[in-house]
Amino acid sequence: MTTLTIGGGQVLTPELDVTTADVLVDTDSGEILAVEDPGELGGDDYLDASGGLVIPGLVNAHTHVAMTLFRGHADDKELDAWLQEDIWPVEAELTAEDVRAGTRLGIAEMIRTGTTAFADMYFFMEEVADVVSETGIRAMLGSGCITVGKDDEEAHEDFERGLEFARAYDGHSQGRIQTMFNPHSLTTVGQSFYEEYVPVAREEEIPIHIHANETENEVDPLVEEHGERPLEYAEDLDVLGEDSFIAHGVHVDEHEQELLADTGTAVIHCPASNMKLASGMAPIQSMLDAGVTVGLGTDGAASNNDLDMFDEMRDAAMVGKLATMDASAVPAEAVVEMATQGSADALGFDSGRVEAGANADLAVVDLDAEHLKPAHDLVSHLTYAVKGSDVCHTICDGEVLMEDRELQTMDLDAVKEAAGDHAEALVDRAAN
Ligand SMILES: CSC[C@H]1O[C@@H](n2cnc3c(O)ncnc32)[C@H](O)[C@@H]1O
Ligand SMILES: [Zn+2]
């Protein structure tokens, strides 16, 4: 067994207390072995966390990571126009190499801002899995399935591809990759496809993740067509359950919130995307009160426009108050919980807490910057004041992925250059 001590710093406990302690990690199994008083732990290697706060690595529970290629390509439009006029036309030109380049860029950004795990729904997922494998991050991956605009044969191929990917890659990269089944949404996938494929996913115990209740434009026609609320329809299709999580959940009524809580379905809150696309303000405090598991996600970089979970945490707290006109709603503690344990629970990862037995997925926040002084309350700082650039070390599965702000598994300059080249060529192809 090889061990690493992350020492000399303060540690955020699962109860959200801050204590002075060292963290011992088994770099072979990727587990946290102990959290003890300073100087008590041995360890083959040492990572200096002095002046820093060791926190659970953040879990970005909903994104489309290769959409970094479209950052700034299409802004200031609502969801339907944005997807149909700008995003889907360029996505139609995507190649496997584009997705590889965009994924590398997104993962570099995530590691540099303290994210150690993410859930990704996209195209060319074998490429995404390869990049996850080479960079050392943890991920829940699924190949997105859409039927709208496709003939029956193409739509079936999409679903078969989605299930094949989930079967082939689950447990890949020493267990860092887990897989899911990703019908895109309740309106972009026909009912017969849910009826045909959800039982297969359930039978094979493949988790289900979809976009749901994101905009009124999506909810209203669905209610008209099916005579019930979207999540009632989802419940009829067996889409809800312990092994399911939905992205957005902006327009959910009281009964739908009860359904989420009763079925154990998690919601992934994406506040920046919801604000930018003017989708609405999710009733997060109400869902927390109802007992719903809530995680946090950035959505893709084209609707955000970054993958920095600290930014997302601040947005979650701010919009939570605005939505309720109650400054005590969605407090700092709830937000830290959302970005760590909440997201990890939604994805089924044993991460999100600095505790013996959990995955050694950690980030160290350097507390030296002027915007972090004074330090009355570090949980408040994590939500309201820390920036992604304050992260100095990132560790996933016991492996140091960033040390002293230097990526250890990626050549950042090469990644940025390749992504720029791919993005430019892709947008040109789509325009011609
Ligand atoms: C089938 S792969 C995923 C698909 O989802 C698109 N997408 C990106 N952001 C959103 C969003 O906020 N709501 C719905 N769909 C979104 C992405 O561009 C891919 O086409
Ligand atoms: Zn999304």
Image: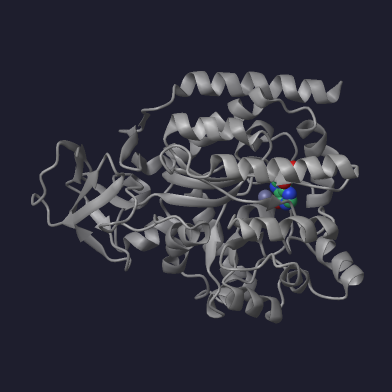
**Can residue 64 be seen by looking at this rendering?**
no
How far from the left and from the top, in percent, is residue 416?
54, 23
Q: Which quadrant of the figure contains the C terminus?
A: top right
Which corner quadrant of the image does residue 37 belong to?
bottom left
Q: Residue at x 12, y 52 (%)?
A: 38
Horizontally, residue 87 falls left or right of residue 341, namely: right
| Residue at x 64%, y 80% (from the top left corner) | 258
Q: Position of residue 146 (x, y in %)?
A: 79, 47
Residue 75 location in percent, x, y?
74, 42
Residue visible at 69% across and 64% down in the picture: 239
Tell me if I can see residue 8 in this picture. yes
Q: Nearer the viewer, residue 199 or 108?
A: 199
Q: Going by the image, does 247 lie left or right of 327?
A: right
Residue 153 in the figure: left or right of residue 203: right
Horizontal side, residue 167 vs residue 328: left or right: right
Answer above or below: position of 359 versus 255: above
Quadrant in which residue 20 is drawn: bottom left
